[in-house]
Amino acid sequence: MQETSPNPSSTSAVSHLARQLRAGRVYRREDLAHLSNAVDRHLRVLVEQGKLKKLAPGLYHAPRASAFGPLPPTDERVVEGFLRDKAFLVFSPSSYNALGLGTTQLYNRTLVYNHKRHGVFRLGNRQFDFRVKPRFPKKLSPEFLFVDMLNNLDELAEDRDAVLVQAHSKMPTFDQPRLRKAVASFANMATRKLLRQWTGA
């Protein structure tokens, strides 16, 4: 029985698409559509070959090879590809532990503050909690984390009253101009009211 071989033109088209990929990058389907006349079929082939990993419908990652196997994409690349936007802040509530307020819980979730999407989305083997915020900083600071922790206090798996006692006593140790700016920019109404009570303002 004669063995059938793959369509040469199809194989060539897949190879052409594969050559355009850059290791470590995250791609949306529309980023690659202009490189193929049958993009969905060719993407399936590349996933089968391991040259692409599917993160979500229409979202793919070109893995970078290492001695330990394919490297996963960074959270920032995944989120940027998903949002088609660079305006976001990615962090874990575990970051609050660095403030020295007695919080010790480790959280298996990743928060994404952004201007576009709201909800929990599974991208690859990770879950991201997207929250639409009018404002957020470009990077984390102790003062922002302090304000954000107070904003989200009811969501934390900690003794609320114990954390508030620590937060009250540690508040003077933060950079006060930066703290005032963080409160003005990022605090919700409940946090503003609490801090006014603490400062007697």
Image (tube, rainbow, N blue to C red):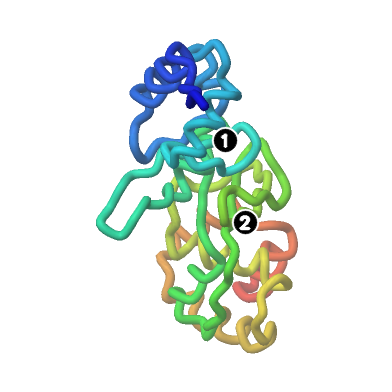
Residue type for callout 2? Gln
Task: From the top left corner, tell me how far across and down residue 83 is, in percent.
Answer: 59, 35
Of 128 and 154, the residue lying toward us: 128
Horizontal side, residue 39 vs residue 8: left or right: right
Q: Is residue 109 above or below residue 1?
A: below
CB contact under 8 Å: marks 2 and 1: no
Residue displayed at 68% across by 40% down: 117
Question: For the residue labelled by badge 2, is the local secondary structure a helix, a strand or a loop?
Answer: strand
Residue type for callout 1? Leu
Residue displayed at 47% across by 32% down: 46
- 2 or 1: mark nearer the eye: 1
Residue 173 found in image quarter? bottom left
Location of mark 1 (residue): 59
Of 3 and 20, the residue lying toward us: 3
Residue displayed at 65% across by 83% down: 158
Location of mark 2 (residue): 127
Mark 2: few, some, or many residues within 10 Å (few <14, many ≥20)?
A: some
Q: Is residue 185 visible?
A: no
Q: Is residue 170 visible?
A: yes
Most extreme residue toward the left is 67
Task: From the top left corner, tell me how far across and down residue 74 is, in percent.
Answer: 42, 49
